[in-house]
C-alpha cells in the first residue's frame, strides 16, 4: 500500500453497494442524511452483458461464473471453501449479487419469524412479518415486481405492479400436474419487468438472466436504487475494499479501506453500516478485532461468524419425450409450490421446503451436465445430449436450514486477497434435518414430474453450487448474550454500528432472501432516523 490518506468525516458510511446497501443508502439520502457507500467492485454496464454475445454460455463457465474462486475478477477476494458442503456464490460490484441472480422475489412467511414458538427449533425473530410488510411493499415498488396477487398460501399483498411472466410449456405442464394432484402452486413474484417501466424495457424471454440483462428488465440495484440514491445526494466510492472498522470501546469511529490503486484511506464516520452479505460482513467484523474486542468487533456474544445458514438444495429434473424448450425465458421465475413448507412432524423432520420450477440449460450447459443433470461422455454423448436438450425442466427442493453454531465463517490461515487481507473460510455441513427435508422433497417432486409427463427423472441429491444465500452470521435478537444486533440492526456492543444484510437473520425460512433483506435494510434506515412506517395487519391464509 503506497500511502495513507485521512478523508473528511461523514455522517454515515455504508460498506457494500448491493441489495441491502443500496436500499439503506437511498432511504437515508432521500431523508437528507449524508451517506457515503464504499463498494469493493465497480459499475457493470448492462450493455456489456455476455448474453448479447454468441459466447454467452462460455462466460458463465469463467468470467461470469457466480463463484469468485472460479471467476477470479480483480474485484473479488478468494474464499477458503475446503471445509464446506456448499460452495459460496456472490458478486462484488455496484449492485452486488443482484448483478448475477435469477430475480425470484418471494418473502419470508409469517411463521418464519416464530419458529421457536411454533416448532421448538431455532430462535424467534425480534420483529415479525407485520413490521416488514410496509417495507416489502415499498421495496416491490422500487425494484419492479411482476406477479399475481391472491396466492392462498401467503398473506394478502398489494397488487403486483406488472402481470406474471409467461410460464412456458414445461411449467404449464407441471402446474397442471400440481392441480391434478391437489397440490399448491402459484406464479412466482419476479423482480423482472413484464412491461416497460421507469426507463427499463419489459422482458423478452431471452433466458440468460444470471449473466445480466442488457434490456434492464431484470432488476439489479445499480438500475433501481442507485440512480435515485445518487440523485438524492448519496455518494458512492467504487473499488474501495474495506479492510477494518475502526473503534474505541463501545463505539465505532470509521473505516479503513484500500483503493483500486493501493492507497490506504482512513474514513472517519459517525455511524458505520455493514451490508456485505453473511460472508463479507462476518469477515470484516473479525478483521476489526482490537484491544477492547479481541475476538472481533461486536462479538461479545461469540456469535459473529457463527450460525451460517444457506438453503440446501436438491434438483429433480424431468426428461420429457417431446420438446418443451425450457431454455426460453428467465430460468428461475415460473411457478413455485409451498405445499410442504410448514412443519408436519409425521414426516420425520421440522420445517419444510419450497419447490421452484426451473427452466433448462442452453446447449453448452446441457452438454456439461448443468443443474445437476449429467450427460454421458464418449460414444453415447450425442444421443444423451439430444435426449435432454430442449426436453427437460427441473424442480428445485429448497430446504430450510436451521442455525448451528458450528457452521461458521472464520478468517483463513492460508488465503489472502490481493491487498494482503486475510480471506474468509467457510465451515459448513448440511445437517440431518435438512437432509431429511431434501429426501422427502425429492420423492414428492419426482411424483409431480412423472405426473406432468416426464419419462425419466434425474436426481441431484445436493447441489454444491447453490451457495447464493449467505445468512445468519451476525444474528438479531432481544438478548445481547445470544445475538449480535438488536431489532433495529444496531450492534449491542457499539450502537453506532449497524448490520443490515442477511447476516442478521436468526432463521432463514425456505425461500430466496433478497426481498426480506431489502425490507430489513429499509426498516433499519427508518429506525436510524427514529421513525418507521406503520405496521400493516396481515391477513393470513391457510
Image (cartoon, rainbow, N blue to C red):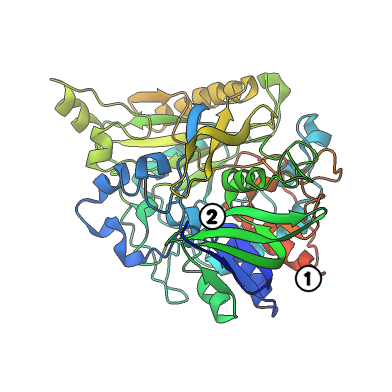
Q: Nearer the viewer, residue 390 or 272?
A: 272
Q: CA distance from mark 1 to mark 2?
A: 30 Å
Secondary structure beneath label 1: loop
Mark 1 or mark 2: name the one nearer the start of the chain: 2
Which residue was labeled with disc 2? 189
The residue that appears at 63% across and 45% down in the rendered structure is 287
Q: Residues within 10 Å of mark 2 (few under 14, many from 20)?
A: many
Residue 160 shows in the view:
no
Q: Nearer the viewer, residue 51 or 356?
A: 51
Residue 388 shows in the view:
yes
- Place of residue 252 in the rendered image (x, y in percent of width and height, measured from the top left): 74, 58
The relative height of residue 92 versus residue 143 in the rendered view (above or below) is: above
Q: Nearer the viewer, residue 410 or 117?
A: 410
- Which quadrant of the view contains residue 115? top right
The residue that appears at 38% across and 70% down in the rendered structure is 201
Disc number for residue 529? 1
Amino acid at each position: 500500500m503506497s500511502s495513507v490518506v485521512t478523508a473528511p468525516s461523514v455522517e454515515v458510511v455504508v460498506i457494500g453497494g448491493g441489495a441491502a446497501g443500496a436500499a439503506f443508502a437511498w432511504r437515508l439520502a432521500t431523508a437528507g442524511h449524508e451517506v457515503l457507500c464504499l463498494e469493493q467492485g465497480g459499475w457493470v454496464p448492462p450493455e456489456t452483458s455476455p448474453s448479447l454475445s454468441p459466447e454467452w454460455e462460455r462466460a458463465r463457465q469463467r468470467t461470469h461464473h457466480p463463484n469468485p474462486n472460479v471467476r477470479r475478477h480483480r474485484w473479488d477476494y478468494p474464499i477458503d471453501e475446503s471445509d464446506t458442503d456448499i460452495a459460496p456464490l456472490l458478486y462484488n460490484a455496484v449492485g452486488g449479487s443482484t448483478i448475477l441472480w435469477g430475480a425470484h422475489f418471494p418473502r419470508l412467511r409469517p411463521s418464519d419469524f416464530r419458529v421457536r414458538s411454533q416448532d421448538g427449533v431455532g430462535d424467534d425473530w425480534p420483529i415479525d412479518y407485520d413490521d416488514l410488510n410496509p417495507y416489502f411493499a415499498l421495496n416491490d415498488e422500487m425494484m419492479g415486481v411482476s406477479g399475481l396477487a391472491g396466492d392462498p398460501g401467503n398473506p394478502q399483498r398489494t397488487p403486483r405492479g406488472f402481470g406474471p411472466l409467461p410460464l412456458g410449456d414445461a411449467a404449464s405442464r407441471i402446474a397442471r400436474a400440481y392441480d391434478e394432484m391437489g397440490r399448491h402452486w402459484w406464479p412466482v413474484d419476479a423482480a423482472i419487468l413484464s412491461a416497460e417501466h421507469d426507463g427499463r424495457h419489459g422482458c423478452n424471454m431471452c433466458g440468460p438472466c444470471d449473466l445480466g440483462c442488457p434490456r434492464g428488465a431484470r432488476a439489479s440495484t445499480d438500475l433501481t436504487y442507485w440512480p435515485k440514491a445518487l440523485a438524492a445526494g448519496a455518494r458512492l466510492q467504487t473499488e474501495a475494499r474495506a479492510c477494518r472498522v475502526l473503534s474505541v470501546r463501545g463505539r465505532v469511529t470509521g473505516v479503513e479501506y484500500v483503493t483500486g490503486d493501493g492507497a490506504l484511506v482512513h474514513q472517519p464516520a459517525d455511524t458505520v453500516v455493514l451490508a456485505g452479505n453473511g460472508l463479507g460482513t462476518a469477515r470484516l467484523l473479525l478483521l476489526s478485532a482490537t484491544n477492547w474486542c479481541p475476538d472481533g468487533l461486536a462479538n461479545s456474544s461469540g456469535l459473529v461468524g457463527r450460525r451460517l445458514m444457506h438453503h440446501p438444495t436438491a434438483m429433480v429434473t424431468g426428461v420429457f419425450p417431446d420438446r418443451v424448450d425450457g431454455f426460453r425465458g428467465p430460468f428461475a421465475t415460473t411457478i413455485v409450490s409451498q405445499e410442504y413448507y410448514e412443519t408436519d412432524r409425521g414426516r420425520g423432520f421440522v420445517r419444510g421446503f419450497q419447490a421452484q420450477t426451473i427452466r433448462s440449460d442452453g446447449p453448452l450447459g446441457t452438454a456439461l451436465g448443468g443443474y445437476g443433470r449429467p450427460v454421458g461422455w464418449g460414444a453415447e454423448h450425442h444421443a444423451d445430449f439430444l435426449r435432454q436438450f430442449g426436453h427437460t425442466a427441473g424442480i428445485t427442493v429448497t430446504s430450510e436450514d436451521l442455525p448451528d453454531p458450528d457452521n461458521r465463517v472464520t478468517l483463513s490461515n492460508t488465503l489472502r486477497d490481493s491487498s494482503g487481507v486475510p480471506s474468509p473460510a467457510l465451515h459448513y455441513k448440511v445437517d440431518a434435518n435438512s437432509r431429511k427435508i431434501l429426501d422427502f422433497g425429492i420423492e414428492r417432486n419426482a411424483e409431480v414430474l412423472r405426473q406432468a409427463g416426464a419419462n425419466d427423472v434425474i436426481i441431484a441429491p445436493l447441489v454444491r453450487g447453490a451457495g447464493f444465500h449467505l445468512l445468519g452470521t451476525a444474528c438479531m435478537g432481544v438478548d445481547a448474550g445470544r445475538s449480535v444486533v438488536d431489532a433495529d440492526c444496531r450492534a449491542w456492543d457499539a450502537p453506532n454500528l449497524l448490520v443490515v444484510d442477511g447476516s442478521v437473520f436468526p432463521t432463514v425460512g425456505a425461500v430466496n432472501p433478497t426481498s426480506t433483506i431489502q425490507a430489513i435494510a429499509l426498516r433499519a434506515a427508518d429506525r436510524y432516523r427514529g421513525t418507521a412506517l406503520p405496521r400493516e395487519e396481515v391477513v393470513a391464509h391457510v
